[in-house]
Image (cartoon, helix red, strand yellow):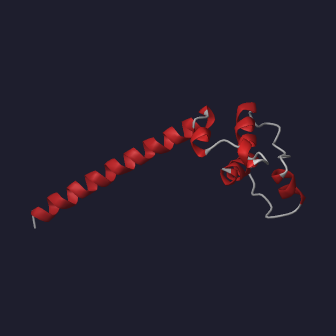
Amino acid sequence: VFSLGTTAFELVRRRPLAPNGPEWHALRDGGAAFPSDTPPDLREVVAGLLHPNPAWRPTAAQALQHPELQSEVQRMAQELAAEKQHVQQYREDVARLSKHR
């Protein structure tokens, strides 16, 4: 869950984290410096994923229940469903063309 938090934090900041150093240690200690334009709800979710005490972090299932992440999960599910439909259509087309040879 912490890794998801660091990835989300990088996206919020629009730049990668340093692999070590003061910024990294501040993050590990619960002192993530969010950009001032970060929406409060998003800040709360990401800060929860980054909580220094693993017992206080949400589980992956709990994290996915946050509305801020739900919309992204739903978008990805729709894209996956569309891709599966394209693959199925492709397979049907290949099977139909193979019969006509």
Residue most extreme to the left: 100
Between 16 and 25, which is closer to the camera in this rendering? 25
Res 78 quadrant in image: top left
Q: Is residue 88 above or below residue 48?
A: below
Res 19 quadrant in image: bottom right
What is the count of numbered marks? 0
Residue 77 percent coordinates (x, y): 45, 43
Left or right relative to 38: residue 82: left
Residue 61 percent coordinates (x, y): 56, 42
Residue 5 percent coordinates (x, y): 70, 48
Q: Residue at x 10, y 67 (%)?
A: 101
Residue 16 percent coordinates (x, y): 75, 57
Res 41 quadrant in image: top right
Residue most extreme to the bottom: 101
Q: Residue at x 58, y 35 (%)?
A: 65
Residue most extreme to the right: 22
Q: Residue at x 74, y 33 (%)?
A: 39
Left or right relative to 77: residue 52: right
Between 55 and 81, which is closer to the camera in this rendering? 55
Q: Is residue 100 above or below residue 26?
A: below
